[in-house]
Image (spheres, grey):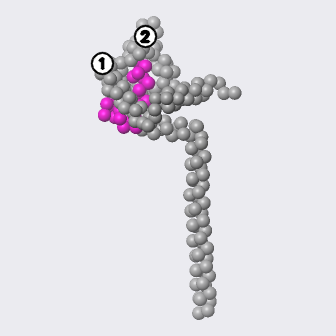
């Protein structure tokens, strides 16, 4: 009986210390996450990546009714300007890997947005151009891009918008050159 009493008391004490330890660990983890988030919020790379992901999700939602994906925008807009481009040129313009470009072009070709034309000077190569449907989508796509940009930059005055774009250009320029 006395042993049972001491055993129950010991369990109560141990349980109290375990509960206190669990609470301590929970608070420690929460505080660590807060510190990590505040550290991440001071990282240009993290914040730029986060903004790009959120921006891409918003654009994906806006473009979905048009049957266009955000990854297809550089292709559509480049073909609007250049009319005919090779796959290699599109890879360089969009700054993506060749396999990603292949997937996007196949999807766009399937959806009737682009077509391939043989290169008369090189039988192994072809030019990519917009179809009539692809050209028709340009106007609504541009409207969606403008809406998305306006939404993302809501609350920025014109000077802040220009500064933001200037900062992004500088970051892109810095990261596009050979590292030291």
Instruction: Examine the structure image and report whether residue 133 is included in the region drawn in magenta.
Output: no
Residue occupying the point 51% across, 40% down: 50
For label 1, count other residues whose C-alpha is less than 10 Å away and answer few (under 14), some (14-19) or many (20+).
few
Query: Are dots 1 and 2 in contact, CB under 8 Å?
Result: no
Label disc, if present, on residue 132 of the rendered structure: 1
The quadrant in which the N terminus is found is: bottom right
* Total numbered labels: 2
Residue 65 inside the magenta-drawn segment:
yes
* Helix, strand or loop for disc 1: helix
Q: Main secondary structure of the magenta part?
A: helix
Residue 95, image x, y percentages:
51, 25
Q: How crowded is mark 2: few (under 14 residues within 10 Å), some or many (20 or more)?
A: few
- Residue at which label 2 appears: 119
Nearer mark to the viewer, of 1 and 2 = 1
Residue at image coords 57%, 71%: 19
Asked whether residue 145 appears in the rendered view, the answer is: yes
Q: In this view, does 30 lie above or below 115?
A: below
Residue 86's image quarter? top left
Instruction: Name the one closer to the observer, 154 or 104.
Output: 154
Give the alpha-carbon distance from disc 1 to disc 2, as whole Å. Answer: 20 Å
Image quadrant containing the C terminus: top right
Residue at point 58% right, 48% down? 38
Query: Magenta region: which residues?
Result: 58-79
Q: Which of 114 and 144 is in front in this view?
A: 144
Residue at 60 percent across and 65 percent down: it is 24
Q: Is mark 2 on a helix, strand or loop?
A: strand
């Amino acid at each position: 009986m006395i042993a049972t009493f001491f055993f129950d008391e010991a369990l109560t004490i141990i349980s109290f210390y375990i509960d206190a330890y669990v609470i301590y660990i929970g608070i420690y983890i929460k505080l660590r996450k807060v510190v990590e988030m505040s550290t991440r919020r001071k990282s240009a790379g993290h914040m730029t990546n986060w903004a790009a992901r959120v921006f891409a999700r918003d654009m994906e939602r806006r473009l979905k009714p048009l049957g266009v994906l955000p990854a297809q925008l550089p292709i559509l807009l480049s073909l609007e300007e250049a009319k005919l481009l090779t796959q290699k040129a599109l890879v360089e313009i969009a700054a993506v890997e060749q396999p990603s470009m292949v997937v996007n072009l196949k999807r766009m070709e399937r959806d009737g947005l682009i077509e391939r034309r043989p290169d008369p000077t090189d039988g192994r190569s072809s030019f990519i151009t917009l179809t009539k449907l692809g050209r028709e989508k340009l106007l609504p796509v541009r409207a969606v891009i403008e809406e998305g940009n306006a939404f993302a930059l809501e609350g920025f005055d014109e000077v802040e918008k220009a500064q933001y774009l200037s900062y992004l250009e500088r970051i892109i320029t810095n990261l596009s050159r050979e590292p030291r």
